[in-house]
Image (cartoon, grey):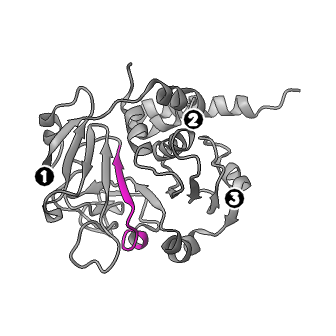
Amino acid sequence: MDYTPDEIMVVCISRCIRDGEVVAQGIATPVVAAGYLLARHTHAPNLYFSSAIGQGVCHEPAPLRLLSVESLWLDRAIITIGFVRGVIDIFPRLCPLEFFRPAQVDQFGNFNNIAFGKNYKSPRLRLPGTGGIPDVTTYLDKVYLYVPRHSRLTFVPDLDFRSGLGYDESRVQGSGPQRLITDLGQFDFNGENPKHGMRLISYHRGVTLERIQSKTGFRFEIAPDIQETTPPTEDELYLIRDEIDPLRIRQLEFLSGSKRRTLLHEIIAQEKDEMRVPS
């Protein structure tokens, strides 16, 4: 059955989740949100969600939307905690699983969401910023990464800045990332020696090892039992397309320029139609 890069990534994210976990969601991460929702619809019905959007903890998650997403999360909150309190007080106790999207990542799982360019005061491009990343990546054990568009722009031998902590000898608690999922394959950091860095554990259908290496700015290990990523099931694809994200909000993370703008307008128009009260 045919599927798209966004769909295989959603499925891979979903399969990282265990039932009963607390999962944390960022502000602009629809691919991650879709993966969490897929897990809840399938093998993890007892998930709890900590959302940076609603700044609270929910058991009933909000559907994927753009215009009304804040009120949807707030309406479902068991408790509203606030962003700062969540990062420094609640998260160390709940130990949630969280996916981050790095703008740059090195072979040891350190990553950058600050800026491109070595001059902080005058960078080539200012990125969204760190949020709570410098805090939580120093103590969480369940840090995961995802990259919708695998390229040498993201996978670099040296970061311009470091906002997320990977495998580093200076750590006193927590661990580096457990898994890194891209539109080409899946990596872990659990090789014979974690100091060696990323290890490719599966490649998506139609992707070669040579292509993955050519789009990565450093050498990585290859797992001895590497295999093709297990494809989505028909049920998983139905849930993604018809129940979880029929508006295709997840695809915004894979597009840029005019294609992204066009899809954005289409989503907003569909949401307005849904919200419109019949006269």
- The residue labelled by disc 1 is 218
Instruction: Report if the CB atoms under discs 2 and 3 are less than 8 Å apart.
Output: no
Q: Quadrant of residue 59?
A: bottom right
Residue at image coords 51%, 57%? 21
Residue at image coords 69%, 65%? 79
Of the 4 image quadrants, the one containing the C terminus is: top right
Which label belongs to residue 77?
3
Q: Could you say where residue 106 lies in the image, as x and y percent from the top left?
A: 21, 58
Relative to 23, does residue 8 appear above or below in the rendering? above
Dot placed on the residue nearer the N-terminal end, 1 or 3: 3
Q: Amino acid at mark 2?
A: Ile
- The residue labelled by disc 2 is 244
Local packing at callout 1 (Cα closer than 10 Å; few below 14, some 14-19, many 20+) is some
Of the 4 image quadrants, the one containing the N terminus is: top left
Q: How far is disc 1 from disc 2 in space, using C-alphas? A: 36 Å
Span colored in magenta: 135-147
